[in-house]
Amino acid sequence: MGQPQTVVFDIGNVLLRWDPRNLYRRIFDDEEQMEWFLAHVCTPDWNVQQDRGRDWDEAVALLVKDHPTQETHIRAFHERWDETVSGVFDVHVALLLRLREAGVPNYCITNFSGPKFVLAQQRFPFLSGFDGTIVSGDERLLKPDPAIYYLLLDRYGLMAEDCVFIDDSKPNVEAARDVGMHAIHCVESIDLAAELRRYGFSV
């Protein structure tokens, strides 16, 4: 592989601090009850279907049917979704902005509900500044399916070996490498700027 020229970001827990606990700690007084709710009612498997494109009203109705006593808490996931995002990773957002100032092509591939991504763009305008964006809920494809990476490459005329992909999920990072991209596993303790400098970016 040659030296890459393009950076491709994930959004959740790379740029935005997302966790349903940010919301539900305001709703539940008891941590154990909150964890039970997130493990058995509004589960990751349920939420990921919205990232795949399922309508939120349909998703809520399905859960309310099965858990009628939890209706208020279930509806909160949809109606108060904005509270699941506590803010941004300031260092990573500043890095993204420096890349843009330097003229580095930057894109994103995110597992995200289409309507919720629009809300996130309204709250965080930097999310509207990518040279190209692939949102799983709009495409009905989820990482780590190779098809979502190829969609980015094909839609925007990119070469895999020219791209560095950044994601907090190890399976998503491995999938990017499998399609020929460079990739960085973005854990909390990482110095992302240093990692990008290793690939030749001046940041």
Image (spheres, rainbow, N blue to C red):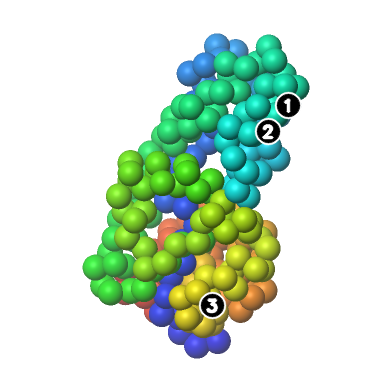
Q: What amino acid is at disc 1?
A: His
Image quadrant for the N terminus?
Answer: bottom right
Q: Residues within 10 Å of mark 3 (few under 14, many from 20)?
A: few
Q: Residue furthest left?
A: 101
Image depth: mark 2 or mark 3 in front:
3
Q: Are marks 2 and 1 in contact (CB under 8 Å)?
A: yes
Looking at the picture, which amino acid does disc 3 mark? Asp
Question: Which element carries disc 1, helix, strand or loop?
Answer: helix
| N-terminal label among 2 and 3 | 2
Question: Callout 2 environment at 10 Å: few (<14), some (14 to 19), or many (20+)?
Answer: some
> Whole-percent x and y of residue 89?
39, 47
Q: Which mark is residue 154?
A: 3
Q: Is residue 123 visible?
A: yes
Left or right, 105 with respect to 80, comes to left
> Which residue is under mark 1?
40
3D distance between C-alphas at marks 2 and 3:
33 Å
* Residue 95 is at least partly visible in this image: no
Residue 8, horizontal then vertical, whole percent: 46, 67
